[in-house]
Image (cartoon, rainbow, N blue to C red):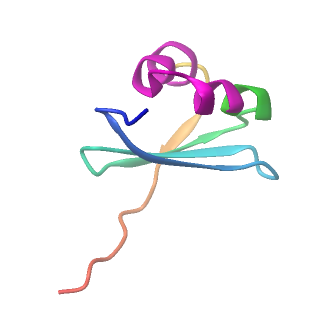
Amino acid sequence: MPSSVIQSHHYDPEREELSITFTTGRSYVYFHVPPEAYEDFRDAFSKGRHFNAKIRDSYDFAEAAAQPTDS
């Protein structure tokens, strides 16, 4: 189901990193996210609600660098 707050997400299982881009355009990388936690997030009916309850305050994170745009 599409999310009203999460635009996209990507999981790197080797690094256990979950990258999330919000509809605001801001992107964050969450570290040491185990595969089971990502699978629960991926399968959640409400990604935003699941993110707030299970990921946001549970893992270390950093804001991802903004991607350059063509002008």
Residue 2 place in picture, x, y as percent: 38, 36
Q: Is residue 43 left or right of residue 52?
A: right
Which sits in the foreground, 54 or 66? Answer: 54
Residue at (52, 19) in percent of width and height = 57
User: From the image, which quarter does the C terminus lie in?
Assistant: bottom left
In the picture, measured across the screen, residue 10 lies left or right of residue 56, that is right
Q: Is residue 50 magenta?
A: yes
Q: Residue at x 73, y 36 (%)?
A: 32
Instruction: Locate residue 8, reporting x and y percent.
Output: 44, 48
Residue reaching furthest to the bottom: 71
Report the front residue among 25 and 65: 25
- Residue 22: quadrant of the picture: top left
Q: Is residue 68 above or below residue 70?
A: above
Residue 3 magenta-highlighted:
no
Q: Classify residue 58 by image quadrant.
A: top right
Spot the residue most to the left. Answer: 71
Magenta segment boundaries in residue numbering: 39-56
Q: Magenta-highlighted stretch: main secondary structure?
A: helix
Where is residue 52 shown, x and y percent of the image?
Answer: 45, 18
Q: Position of residue 62 (x, y in %)?
A: 50, 44
